[in-house]
Structures are given as structure tokens and as C-alpha cells.
Amino acid sequence: MENKQKHIIWDVWVNVCRFLLAAVFIFSGFVKAVDPLGLLYKIQDYLTAFGMITWFPKSVLFLFAVALPVFEFSVGVFLFFGIRKHFASTLALMMLVVLTPLTLYLALTNPVSDCGCFGDALVLTNWETFGKNIVLLIAAVSVFKGRDLVIRFVSAKLEWVASIYTFLFVLSLSVYCLGHLPILDFRPYKIGHNIKAGMEIPKGAKPSVFETLFVLEKNGKREEFTLDNYPDSTWKFVKVHTVLKEKGYEPPIHDFSMMAMETGNDLTDSILSDKGYTFLLVAHRIEEADDSNIDLVNEIYDYSVENGYGFYALTSSPRDKVELWCDRTGAEYPFCQMDEITLKTMVRSNPGLLLIKNGTILNKWSDNHLPDEYVLSDKLDKLSIGSQKQVSDLRTMEYVFLWFIIPLLLVIGVDILVIRRREKKQAVNAE
């Protein structure tokens, strides 16, 4: 009797651990799949911190950023439905055996402030990530040892259908978000958010102190300058970045600063306070930006000039790269300098386009879906795109859930009504 109770407790424990692992892997894979470029940027941050960024071509990192969420999501679904039990439990254990000591090292050295394991949906510190991985490692060991006790929801004869569909679903989702924009935006520059409001600090809260540093070069020597000691025009601009000087309350948006490239003036407040429309062309690295739709960008700029709207290009690239871009594309719009990380956060496209009014983000477009002359057929206040685009995360989640779960429920239904009934009938006849 005692052994039977122990067996029941172990059976329950294995399946509880299986559902815990499944939930974490599904969530982690999903939030990465909807924002593969965000994962790519995080990988690049890690490799840069370790001095390994030049070891891998960008194409390899790009493929990894697409493959990892497909792997995580699929393993989570396999564990949840109890299919590919040996494969899924082994991969989950191997992953956590590698990640747990790695996250301990990251917690001790802190090369990057957060792990990025749940994208921007849930930001954990490195120590929180290590603690999470300790719990998951215990669960993974338990599931691996008791993998034969994992309860199936899909029979072995149909598990290949569920496996292939899961793989194709999450891969298609990731590819779709690459060609468009993330279907869920967890960042502070979400449509409907006001940038100025995101920069505000509650009364009584001590703000973090940031400093904008300009890297300039003269006679082959590079130095960093602030706005207070910005040198004369004999120095050549290289790049600009923002550093944290003193930690305090950190608002969702803390590093939005638009510096006019021609004059060096800070245009941030004037643009965010403009009650008219303003287009922001975001290209975190102008030398890497896709110029295949540059004619559309130039048309949007001409449209802005004709109708009295603001239009600014934001980049972290130096002046010489901007000049090459202008020579190659015929761009006449003004450029502003901004921190590269901020630009990557604003829109997951290079270039991407934002429409703002009085500091509020009304719409976003990737390079592949810019508005054309047929859309911009009148003044913005008379067009639908001149109003804030209606975005519902709940509705989006409902669509994604239904697209994924309904086919799997059909598979389970066929499995229960046809496959298992046939197996029972064959077993009865054999007797």
C-alpha cells in the first residue's frame, strides 16, 4: 500500500512538472516567435558583451533567432499533449542543463541587464532567471526520469500530425511577424501610447540620471563628449549613445532624444508637443537599411511637405553613412541622431515608419507595408490612417489561439472517436 501511494505521488508529480515545463516553454517560444528581430537583437547584445559578435555571420544569428522559438514552442506543446515524450523530455533537460550554469554566470557578471528569455513580455533580472531555471531544471529531471508516466492526449498513431502542425504553425507565425511587424507589441512604443507620457516620472520618485555621449573623431583619435563640452566642427561625428549614470525610477521611455544632425539642436520637445502630424522614418543603422521601397519613402516625404506635416529620419549612424544614403536614394528629408537601442525598440523594421500626433503613436508600418499614393489620397485628418489604429491584444490572442487549437482539437477528436475506438474493437475481437 505504501509503495502504491508513493507511485501515485510520483505519477502526479511527474505530470505536474510536465505541465509546468510545457507552460513555460510554450510562453517563451510564443513571445519570441512574435518578435524574432527582438530575439536577434538580444543575441547580438550578448555576443557583443562577450566580444564574440564577429564570430558568427548575421545570417546564422538570424536563422537561430527564428529556430529557437520554433524549438521552444514545439517542445512545450509536445510536453503538454504527451507526444514525442522521450524526444521532448530529453531536449528540455539538455536545454536546462546548458542554460542553468550559463544564467548563473550571467547573474554573477551581469554583461546584459536582462536575460530576454521571455522577450519584452516579461522582463526578468539575471538572478531571477537563474532562480527560474533551477526550478525548471528540477522539473526537467523529474519528467525525464518519469517520461513513461506522462499521460497522452494524442495517440502514437496521430502524434505525427500534431507534431508537424505545431512546427509549421509556429514557423509560419515567426515568418509572418518578420515580414510585417510583431502581432503583439510589448514595448513602450506601442500604437496608442503617448511618448511624452511614457517619459514622465511620478511625483516624489527619484529619477535615474542618464547622459547622452557623442563619439567624435579627429586625426584618427576618438573621444566621447557630452552636450556641455561638444567640440567644434573640426571633429567628425561617429555615433551617439546613452549611458546610465545613477539608478533611480526608470520610466518606460527614458532615452528618447532627437538631435538634429545638421545643427545638433535637441528637437525632442518641439516634435512631441506638435499638435499636427509627424512621420518618423526609423532606421537604426541607415547603412543596413533596406532601400527596395525607397521610392515610397520619398513619396511620403513629398506628401508631408505638400500638406505641412513633419517628417524626420531617425538613425544612430554617423554623418558619412547618412550622406551615402542620401546620394544613393535621393533622400531630402532631415535626419536626427538617436540611440540605436531606442530605435530598435520603436519599430522592428529597418527602415520602419511611425505616424505620431501630439506625441501619441497613431500607426506603425514595416518597410514592406508602407502607405502609398492610393492610401495617402487626401489630408490625414480626412483619412482612416490619420486616426489611431485600433489594436486589441485580446482579440489578436483569440485569433492566434483559435488558429492553433481548433486543428489540434480536431486531431484529438478523430483520435478519440475513430482511432482509439477502432483499437478497442480490435482488442475485443482478438479476445
Image (cartoon, rainbow, N blue to C red):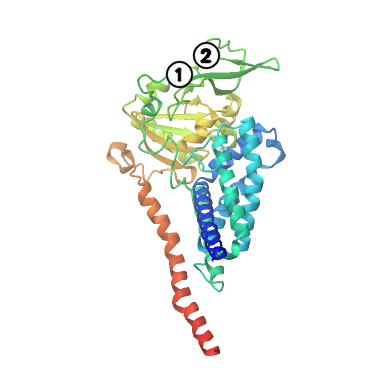
Residue 209 horizontal/vertical position (percent): 49, 18
Q: Considering only vertical position in the picture, is 353 above or below 415?
A: above
Residue 257 horizontal/vertical position (percent): 46, 23
> Is residue 290 something one can see in this rendering?
no
> Which SS class for mark 2?
loop
**Front residue of 192 and 305:** 192
> Which SS class for mark 1?
loop
> Is residue 31 something one can see in this rendering?
yes
Residue sitting farthest toward the front: 1
Residue 269 horizontal/vertical position (percent): 39, 21
Residue at left offset 35%, top offset 46%: 392
Classify residue 233 as left or right of residue 334. right
Question: Dividing the image into 4 quarters, which one contains the C terminus?
Answer: bottom right
First-in-chain label (1 vs 2): 2
Question: Dividing the image into 4 quarters, which one contains the N terminus?
Answer: bottom right
Within-10-Å neighbours for mark 1: few <14, some 14–19, many 20+? some
**Front residue of 405 and 302:** 405
Q: Amino acid at mark 2?
A: Leu
Tags 1 and 2 in contact by the CB under 8 Å rule? yes
Residue at left offset 32%, top offset 38%: 386
Q: Which residue is tagged 1?
A: 266
Residue sitting farthest toward the left: 382
Q: Which residue is tagged 2?
A: 227
Within-10-Å neighbours for mark 2: few <14, some 14–19, many 20+? few
